[in-house]
């Protein structure tokens, strides 16, 4: 799922991967400072903010584990986005090969386990981790370096265990999906993983809200519940795309108008016929596509007598009818475009409407069999 770029703040790059902070993250910082202030004034607020910062250092390291493992398979990462409920590494794709998905997914919790061992073993060997619950609670109430290191151990242990719970699309759910995919079709494996995740996520959300009283944890499991279903639908769409070409989903009948048509006349055509778009042919062989939103914007800023050829929006992305939809569809969501001009060679044949692909699939010819 893509969180809006306008709601995030770029921070810096780690291993060439852009790290961003979602604006809602400041709500968590405010809440942490408020809890700390209530417990021990300004010192408590600063300590609480430091602990939250340490937690999200662990989160970033966890996400980097996914990203660097994916890089080993030639898969890049668009960004790591930090949210109040955790981190999100946005890979350009998730491989369908079960063993690759297993390695990429397991790399995140593996980082947390490594941190637990690297910090926990020396601390325990030096006798700095108390053996009793009372002693541990006393240590965690101190403002000390040992407290910070032990807290890092606790954070990472919790993250490793929590992420391995088989609630799709959390790491544990993805690992379950990858293991199922060794024996089942990918879509069926995803469906089983979602079926397992739904009661677990719903039960955890109810527990977090009514027993633990933890709003953040409730929101996290509610998000996971719906995210799993959304990803299943996405995989289902990808399955439907397989074996189809862009031309199979292209709208061949388009309302084409000449470039000398005025803006006022174009608005009249749009209002009378309600076409999804106007395709403008200025005689150069390349088409311009005017959506209703574009024409509405132009109507507020341009004179009605201006010809459309003088108002061309940026040339629409052009694609070939022979391109496989399953490959092309990966870039649709990130391009921000809703209309694509489709060509067979140099001949324009129609418009691919990114927001109507599911409807186009209903009427598309049967997928082509792979040899």
Image (cartoon, rainbow, N blue to C red):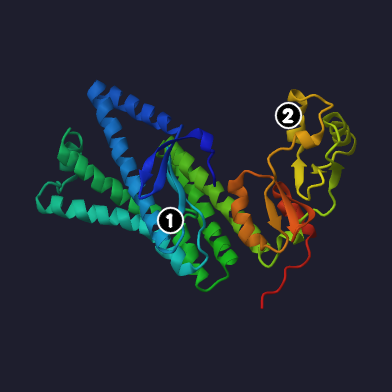
Where residue 305 sits: x, y (%)?
Answer: 84, 27
Q: Which residue is more in the foreground, 39 or 320?
A: 320
The residue that mark 2 highlights is: 297
Cα gap from disc 2 to disc 1, whole angstroms? 44 Å
Extreme residue in the front direction: 284
Q: Is residue 236 visible?
A: no
Disc 2 vs disc 1: which is toward the camera?
2
Lateral position of residue 96 relative to residue 47, left or right = right
Extreme residue in the left direction: 126
Q: Quadrant of the C terminus?
A: bottom right
Where residue 61 sits: x, y (%)?
Answer: 33, 49
Q: Is residue 93 visible?
A: yes
Q: Quadrant of residue 348?
A: bottom right
Q: Is residue 150 above or below residue 102?
A: above
Q: Is residue 97 above or below residue 113?
A: below
Q: Which residue is more in the foreground, 199 or 313?
A: 313
Q: Closer to the N terminus: mark 2 or mark 1?
A: 1
Lateral position of residue 361 relative to residue 177, left or right = right
Where residue 143 sits: x, y (%)?
Answer: 17, 32
Circles 2 and 1: CB distance less than 8 Å?
no
Graded by Cα atoms within 10 Å as few (under 14), some (14 to 19) or many (20 or more), the crowding at tag 2 reads: few
Q: Residue at x 42, y 33 (%)?
A: 25
The residue that mark 1 highlights is: 171
Extreme residue in the right direction: 272
Q: Quadrant of residue 187?
A: bottom right
């Amino acid at each position: 799922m893509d969180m809006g770029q306008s709601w995030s703040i770029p921070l810096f790059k780690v291993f060439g991967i852009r790290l961003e902070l979602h604006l809602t993250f400041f709500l968590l910082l405010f809440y942490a400072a408020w809890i700390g202030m209530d417990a021990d004034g300004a010192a408590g607020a600063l300590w609480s903010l430091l602990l939250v910062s340490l937690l999200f250092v662990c989160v970033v390291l966890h996400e980097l584990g996914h990203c660097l493992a994916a890089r080993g398979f030639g898969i890049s990462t668009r960004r790591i986005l930090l949210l109040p409920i955790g981190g999100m590494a946005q890979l350009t794709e998730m491989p369908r090969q079960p063993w690759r998905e297993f390695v990429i997914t397991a790399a995140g919790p593996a980082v947390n386990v490594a941190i637990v061992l690297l910090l926990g073993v020396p601390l325990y060997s030096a006798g700095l981790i108390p053996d009793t619950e009372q002693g541990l609670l006393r240590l965690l109430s101190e403002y000390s370096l040992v407290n910070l290191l032990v807290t890092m151990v606790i954070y990472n242990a919790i993250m490793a265990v929590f992420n391995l719970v088989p609630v799709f699309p959390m790491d544990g759910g993805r690992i379950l999906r990858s293991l199922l995919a060794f024996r089942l079709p990918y879509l069926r494996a995803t469906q089983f993983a979602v079926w397992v995740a739904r009661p677990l996520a719903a039960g955890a959300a109810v527990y977090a809200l009514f027993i633990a009283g933890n709003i953040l944890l409730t929101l996290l499991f509610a998000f996971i519940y719906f995210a799993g279903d959304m990803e299943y639908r996405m995989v289902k769409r990808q399955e439907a795309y397989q074996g189809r070409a862009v031309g199979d989903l292209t709208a061949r009948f388009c309302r084409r108008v000449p470039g000398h048509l005025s803006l006022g006349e174009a608005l009249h055509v749009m209002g009378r016929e309600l076409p999804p778009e106007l395709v403008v042919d200025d005689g150069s062989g390349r088409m311009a596509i005017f959506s209703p939103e574009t024409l509405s914007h132009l109507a507020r800023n341009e004179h009605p007598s201006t010809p459309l050829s003088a108002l061309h929006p940026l040339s629409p992305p052009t694609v070939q009818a022979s391109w496989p939809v399953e490959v092309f569809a990966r870039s649709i969501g990130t391009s921000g475009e809703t209309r694509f001009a489709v060509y067979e060679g140099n001949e324009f044949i129609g418009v691919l409407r990114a927001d109507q692909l599911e409807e186009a699939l209903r009427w598309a010819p049967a997928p082509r069999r792979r040899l």
